[in-house]
Image: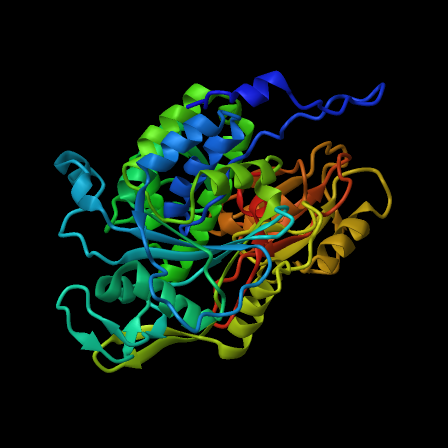
Amino acid sequence: MPTPRSPRSTAAPQRRPQPSPGRTPRRPAPPARRRKPRWGLRVVTTLSVVVLASAGIGHAVMTSLDADIARVDPFKDMKNRPQAGHGMNVLLVGTDGREKISEQERRKYRLGGAPCHCTDTIMIVHLSADRERASVVSLPRDSYAVTPAHVDRTTGKRHGGHPVKLNAAYAEGGPQLTVRTVESMTKVKIDHYLEVDFTSFMRTVDVVGGVPVCTAAPLKDSYTGLDLPAGRHTLAGGQALQYVRARHLDGASDLGRMQRQQRFMAALVERITSSGILLNPMKFRDVTRAVLGSVRADKGFGTHEMLDLGRAMRNFSPSSSEFTTVPIGQMEFAVQGVGSTLKWDPVKAERLFRALREDRPLSVRRPRDAARIVPVAPQQIRVQVENGTATPGLGRRVDAALASTGFRTTGAPVNAAARDVKRTIVAYDPRWDRSAKSLAAALPGSELRPVQGLGATLKVTAGTDFERVRKVRAEASGQGESKVVRGDEVGCS
């Protein structure tokens, strides 16, 4: 609500500096939306809140928004905390909240059973001091953790520190124990706490009109009901929830799920920034209404912080963000009374969290097309090159370029039967379709052509359109890895 002017302000208004001739007067920069991971799941809610600021709706609306957010005090009586670094660290926590979803939707999207009252997703979102970069670190919910001493919020009993899976810290001690445990493990001081649930995620995705995702291989998970053929899809709220929750698609389990969440987050950011939602206050209002009923935040994350964050991130885009997962040292670390956990690699994890504390990028910046993410590593793909043109030496040039990018070429290119090929062709046996898509990504504009019985060696027939080989790399989720990707590398190309 606007405040009345005081008599003094109307009698003696301050003179504002006039712009110099030829310069456009500076206007307050509209705030922009914030990105989120869930990984991705819960971040989407945070995004919706911050995104309001970017619409330039103003302080009055943001103040009413602030009043609607449920508050929690995760920092109460906390002592001996890590030293504050530069930038802002937000602990983004996704909780279950399935009790808020209708019975019909629970059946449709396989959300049966009682809510676990634990964290489904835990991420640290670091916003750089210059607000030009967001670094998102996913913390697997099955990570081996040791809680600080605390009082169990369910039984009221005092516990000493003891081993748990990271997501169980919330069940025992709520947001406060979750923050204390994460700070103890990472030595990263958490500045703000944001908590969202299934309901806000589904409704937000629906309000923005769905989110596009791409998959090179079919995704089918009997636990969540996800069933996506290969290709590009626009997911509505319920299907998006299935996509980011699926854990039984491959052997990567939770690590594979976090990578899919990162892809979804990147796609959501692209959707919000490119669809005009940021410029439509009515859309923002709808997004906010869809989200706010399920958001909890610390008392310090208020109107001022949301407006400042929005202004700082007005130019935010997928390429401004980077994603990674804490490096894992042991995949199945058995703990008595706890079960199988994921134990972090102490050296690599410390290197990662030191970068957050020192406000440094997690990886060296690469040009957008320096290395396209593909489903199969080029080192696993065998290729025979043929020259389909009358240009002498083109076959050798293509073979050498593919080999330098990592593909296992035969090193013996030949001339094709047809010498008038205009568009480069990637011929492949349908059983090796994922390899074919990876190879085609390295040859911009090429045509995929299935050939039954061709076998494991793919065939490239170079056409007159050939210009270059683009670098590609596979997305690794292996033990001990801490691969970092930008938002524009994991979205649909």
Q: State how the image is colored.
A: rainbow
The image quadrant of residue 12 is top right
Q: Position of residue 407 (x, y in %)?
A: 66, 58
For residue 130, above or below residue 478: above
State which quarter of the image contains the C terminus. top right
Q: Camera-side residue: 131 or 474?
A: 131
Q: Position of residue 109 (x, y in %)?
A: 23, 41
In the rendered image, is residue 430 in sight? Answer: yes
Q: Position of residue 475 (x, y in %)?
A: 53, 57
Circle count: 0
The image quadrant of residue 14 is top right
User: As drawn, is 492 to the left or to the right of 185?
Assistant: right
Taking the spot 33% from the left edge, 61% from the top edge, the residue there is 76
Q: Camera-side residue: 36 or 209?
A: 36
For residue 241, above or below residue 2: below
Q: Position of residue 169 (x, y in %)?
A: 28, 66
Residue at the limit of the structure toward the top, as seen here: 11
For residue 78, above or below residue 459: below
Q: Camera-side residue: 386 or 146?
A: 146
For residue 423, above or below residue 224: above
State which quarter of the image contains the N terminus. top left
In the rendered image, is residue 233 in sight? Answer: no
Taking the spot 41% from the left edge, 62% from the top edge, the residue there is 139
User: As drawn, is 80 to the left or to the right of 366?
Assistant: left
Taking the spot 34% from the left edge, 66% from the top edge, the residue there is 77
